[in-house]
Image (tube, rainbow, N blue to C red):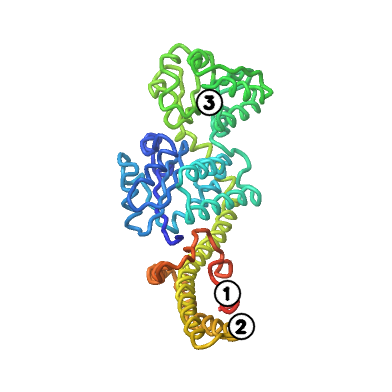
Amino acid sequence: MTTGVIQGVTVSHQRATVDEIESAAAEDEETAVRDLLAREGVDEAFSLQTCNRSEAYVVTESVADGRAALDEFAPEVRDGAVREMDHETSLRHLMRVAAGLESLVLGEDQIIGQLRTAFETARGVGGIGPVLDPAITKAIHVGERARTETTINEGVVSLGSAAVELARQELDLDGATALVVGAGEMGRLAAQAFDDTGVSTLVVANRTVPNAALLADEVETTATAVSLDATDDAAERADVLVTATDSPDPVIDAAALADAGRTLVIDLAQPRDVDPAAGDLDGVEAYDIDSLEAITDETRAQRREAAAKVEAMIDEEFDRLLDSFKRRQADEAISAMYESAEMVKERELRTAVSRLEAQGELTEEQRETVAALADALVGQLLAAPTKSLRDAAAEDDWTTIQTALGLFDPEFGGDDPTPATTERPREAMDDADDIPQHVRDRLGDE
């Protein structure tokens, strides 16, 4: 069914510290989705975990079930850092996230790719169904529109490039040696940003050296690739380093930087890649995600006009999505109602025809007359309830919709082999194959 409601919860940079975001995150998104699906009443689940946010969404039949399923999310995070979201707030929030309006760097491009990956991860473990599918698909569509129809992503568009901009402000990069730890998307963006500066040498460290080598080959700056085991040595020789791995433990010890001289450390990882004690060393200037606020504030100022256009775009797409949900909710109830009525009609029609034939052979024309009478009765009797259900959906009267779904259970009529209503999204009743064509023709404009 498509009658479930979404409940969401988020811990992000807007209210939480890096440590709080880290404590709210599961081992990975797949584990988070599996855990959510195992909770009572959860039909669908989705999780998004990035360096500056940890979010969970569930679809349940009732709001109470959804809240209960999310009660264990971020138990160690203070209440003020956790934001709970109802159905409509979750829908709008997902669009804002995809558009980059909720990012530390306003309009950054990386988040839409992270959202797509999390979407496919959740789908792969059975977390995506008829409610989350259109919601996240719409969010991704909004994110794409925001970047093609506005200038929301011009300038500093990622944490990786923001980190390099911070390095440029704090250090003379001409002739410097830069170390990028992690060859994933964040590391790639940082390496590309360093390539546009005056650094003379770039070192890329990664668990898989061939991946680091591929990234080193992409830049014009003299670059080499090393393994994570060689990171401490590379860090000691570097003037600036940016870390962005998904390692659960620090990959650079404070001891590695003890004799490094002046070193600028920007740790973008979640959890952190660099031992926090490194920040206490003489000559070491350590920054984390929270330290990028100055860079991102400047970017936000430059993008306010574009952000206003994106907000209007989200309002428009949000209304479309809600209308779509309402149509599907009503259509499912209408489909169940017509399916149940058709099952009863067919059964009674067979009985009537059998009795009439016992009184004398029926002509084909007589059979058609009896069948037309049955169709007309079904159509006329259900025309008013059909309109009422559509009105109920338009007015957000989900109690009426749920009641109709319970009353018109297609199984109540016995062992009729007619298949049950499918769970695929439907844009309108006219598209529902399980409503007979003659009924759709007659009621299509009601």
Residue 80 higher or lower than 365, as above or below: above
Gap in angstroms between the C-alphas marked 1 and 3: 57 Å
Residue 158 higher or lower than 444, as above or below: above
Q: Nearer the viewer, mark 3 or mark 2?
A: 2
Circle 3 packing at 10 Å, graded few (<14), some (14-19), many (20+), is: many
Q: Amino acid at mark 2?
A: Glu
Q: Nearer the viewer, mark 1 or mark 2?
A: 2
Q: Is residue 400 visible?
A: no
Query: Which of the image's four quarters has the C terminus?
Result: bottom right
Residue 331 higher or lower than 443, as above or below: above
Query: Which quarter of the picture shows residue 189?
Result: top right
Q: In this view, which residue lies farthest toward the right? A: 220
Residue under label 2: 364
Looking at the rendered structure, which numbered label has been put on residue 182? 3
Residue 129 image offset from top left, x and y in percent: 48, 53
The residue depicted at 61 percent of the width and 30 percent of the height is 193
Residue under label 1: 440
Gap in angstroms between the C-alphas marked 1 and 2: 24 Å
Name the element at disc 2: helix
- Sequence-wise, which precedes: disc 1 or disc 3? 3
Residue 246 image offset from top left, x and y in percent: 47, 29
